[in-house]
Image (cartoon, grey):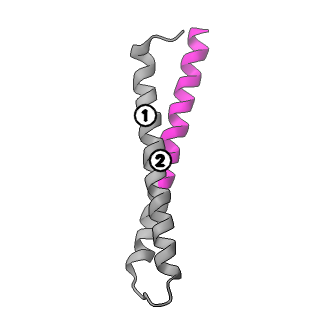
Amino acid sequence: MLPSKLTQPLSSALQTGAYALDRSIQRLDSDAQQIADPQQIAPGPLLDLQQAKLSAEAAIQVVKTSNQVLGKLLDVLA
């Protein structure tokens, strides 16, 4: 079993990454709905769409890095 002082920061990073990814997906969905609305012609949702995409990519990288660190930690302690 891994000491909690080692796993707690990784767990927190995973939770933060997952939360950020969830928020990005919600923003992407909201922007897509606004873009699909023929009565709404505004550049805001298009710009936010790109920001949400970048946020999602960053969140995915946080999760990937946390998983890699945890895997290496397990290898060292095994």
Q: Which numbered dot is residue 13?
A: 1
- Residue shown at 56% from the left, 9% from the top: 77
- The one of 15 and 43 positioned closer to us in this rendering: 15
Give yes or no for residue 52 being in the magenta stretch.
no
> Does 76 appear above or below 29?
above
Quarter of the C terminus within the rendering: top right
Dot 2 surroundings within 10 Å: few (below 14), some, or many (20 or more)?
many
Residue type, label 2: Ala
Which residue lies at the image location 51% right of the left edge and 73% below the top edge?
32
Q: Find the magenta span and give its range.
A: 56-78
Q: Is residue 72 above or below residue 55?
A: above
Using the rendered view, name the quadrant where residue 27 is placed.
bottom left
Q: Is residue 2 above or below residue 19?
A: above
Which comes before the other along the chain, label 2 or label 1?
Answer: 1
Residue 59 is labelled as 2
Determine the secondary structure under disc 2.
helix
Compared with 72, 17 (above or below) is: below
Is residue 62 on the magenta stretch?
yes
The amino acid pointed to by label 1 is Ala
Q: Is residue 66 left or right of residue 71?
A: left
Give the x, y percent position of residue 36: 53, 81
> Is 61 left, or right, of 13 in this rendering?
right
Task: Point out residue 24 in the picture as x, y percentages from the top left corner.
Answer: 46, 57
The picture places residue 23, in percent across and down from the top left corner, at: 43, 54
Q: Residues within 10 Å of mark 1 (few under 14, many from 20)?
A: some
